[in-house]
Image (tube, rainbow, N blue to C red):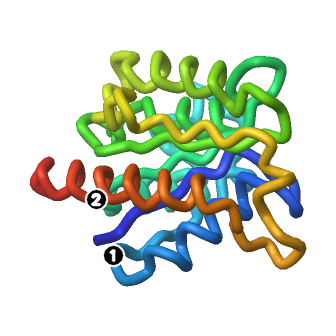
Amino acid sequence: MNIVALVGSLRNESYNRKLAEWIKERYKDKFQLDMADIGALPHYNQDDELDPPDVVAVFKRQVADADGVLIVTPEYNWSVPGVLKNALDWLSRVDKVLVNKPVMIVGVSTGMMGTIRAQLHLRQILQSPGLTAKVLPPAGNEVLINFVNQKFDESGQLTDAATIQLLDQVIGRFVQWIAQSGR
């Protein structure tokens, strides 16, 4: 099984990036997780959508070829980071590679609310006509990791037992969600 990760933070020491890397390592026996370089994408421009820059074509092919998509998002100003929204805008046009693609949303924050507002906005965006992804339903599948700075050690390893248990359960359900989708 091949899953592509869209990490909504460009920061080198991003906790969201650390979480994606941790997921990649922990579940390597269940799936291959490839990180898409959404920071390399140019700003979406409708004038370019029929003949997109090579980096956009490669990105869209990476998502199209994946069995599922893992979105790992921070929350900026109570919403979705611009770099992630830009990537979704590219995916929503012409060949619309996210339509019916299984998607899971996770996010971490140093604050109390996790990334609840960004994740709610993402769920709305992912149901728009150009995307209509098969997002893992929220009931019991929310991964809103708060106070993340207390849950990773200095080497970038997630150490919080309750968070690890939650991820094991929800990622297990995501793998089943992908398998049930026929991918």
Quarter of the image containing the C terminus?
bottom left
In the rendered structure, find residue 175 and report the number of the disc placed on it.
Answer: 2
Q: Choose between 132 and 96: the one closer to the eye.
A: 132
Residue shown at 21%/55% (left/top)? 176
Residue 109, percent from left and from top: 77, 40
The residue under label 2 is which amino acid type?
Val
The numbered mark, 2 or 1, whose residue comes first in the sequence reads 1
Give the quarter of the figure containing the N terminus: bottom left
> Circle 2 sits in a helix, a strand or a loop, which is it?
helix
Q: Is residue 125 above or below residue 145?
A: above
| Category of crowding for the residue at label 2, using alpha-carbon neighbours closer than 10 angstroms: few (below 14), some (14–19), many (at least 20) | some
Determine whether, in the image, residue 165 is placed left or right of residue 181: right
Vertical placement of 99 versus 162: above or below?
A: above
Q: Residue at x 54, y 19 (%)?
A: 120
- Place of residue 61 in the rendered image (x, y in percent of width and height, measured from the top left): 40, 58
Residue 65 found in image quarter: bottom left
Would residue 54 be visible to someone looking at this image?
no
- Circle on res. 30: 1
Residue at image coords 79%, 29%: 112
Identity of the residue drawn at 39% across and 28% down: 138
- Residue 132: which numbered mark, if any? none
